[in-house]
Image (spheres, rainbow, N blue to C red):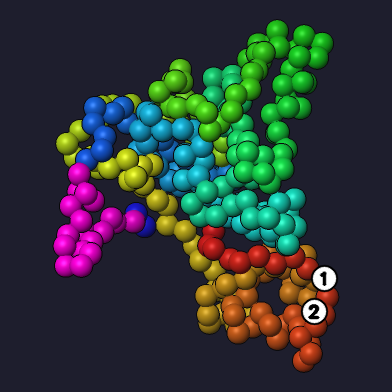
Amino acid sequence: MVQQQSQLSIEYNGQKDNNEELPDIQNEVILKIAVYHPHKPDRRVREFDILGSQKLSELRDAIYCMNDFATSHDKKDGKEDGAVLNTIDKKMSASYLFIENVFYVDTRAEEAGLGAEPDYSEPIRQWVMENGRFKHEKLNKYTRQIMQNVTFEELNIRLNYPYQFLHQGDCQHVIMVHDIRMQSSQDPKKRSAYPYTTYNWQYTRYKCSMCSLYPAEFMTVNDILSGSSPCFFCQKCYGPFHFDKEGIQMFPYSVSDYLGV
């Protein structure tokens, strides 16, 4: 469901903060960008209005995919005690946007002092240069740029043409720019409102696989006694199923918070 911005004014010491209503952008170019399901590329899962002056990394942060959080994918090196790379608002795990023969790679984790993330574009760029493969039809000499250093207005793009967003090793999403237009009087006037969600596919939220009563809060993988992988557990069922009376885990498995699919 599309989130609605609050219409309430904030008051401090009895005075309204009118700065919240003052526009800080005008005459901006707005792109309408759709993101598609990784396993059902004909299914649009989310659509944004984004400013031409915004960085490509701001689109990456706005894209929600459960794979960024499942089984410690939000942590450095996928370790449960690793540094946090991904939150709902900012996602710094390895990823790229592939647009018009250029790989735009996210290097913010390294900039933040968390160590370099894998560059998924490197083996592709090396492969295409071997034995002159770039000369083949539909291949090219692909280049690399830093995602967070490039704005959308710097790109040469085609409308309704499939580009690629890749993250978590092999999770691939088609992205398309469906429209490019000038800002109108009906658009949000605050830069902080963008990327502005204009469409959000209704996600399914599973109930607990054990009791079938309560919404699932945990998702387990390689959970040998559960009967399925992944398997979903509510708060009430998760503990008794996996830990003995002393609170000791009874068998190995991977678990993550369940945020819906």
Q: Is residue 59 magenta?
A: no
132 relative to 33 in the view: left or right:
right
Above or below 91: residue 245: below
Residue located 70% across and 67% down the image = 255
Residue located 29% across and 56% down the image = 4
34 relative to 226 in the view: left or right:
left
Measured in 3D between alpha carbons, the distance from the residue under mark 1 to the one under mark 2, in whole angstroms, is 8 Å
Q: Which residue is mark 2?
A: 249
Viewer-closest of 148 and 203: 148
Residue extending furthest front? 13
33 relative to 224 in the view: left or right:
left
**Please, what is the dominant secondary structure of the magenta stretch?**
loop
Residue located 83% across and 75% down the image = 251
Are discs 1 and 2 less than 8 Å apart at CB? Answer: yes
Viewer-closest of 43 and 243: 243
Please state which amino acid type lies under the numbered disc 1. Pro
Residue 153 x, y percent position in the rendering? 40, 23
Please state which amino acid type lies under the numbered disc 2. Gln
Quadrant the C terminus occupies: bottom right
Residue located 35% across and 38% down the image = 49
Viewer-closest of 227 and 127: 127
* Secondary structure of residue under mark 2: loop
* Secondary structure of residue under mark 1: loop
**Chain part drawn in magenta:** 3-22
Q: Which residue is mark 1?
A: 252
Quadrant the N terminus occupies: bottom left
Above or below 77: residue 148: above
Above or below 64: residue 23: above
Mark number displayed over residue 45: none
User: Can I make out residue 186 in this image?
Assistant: yes
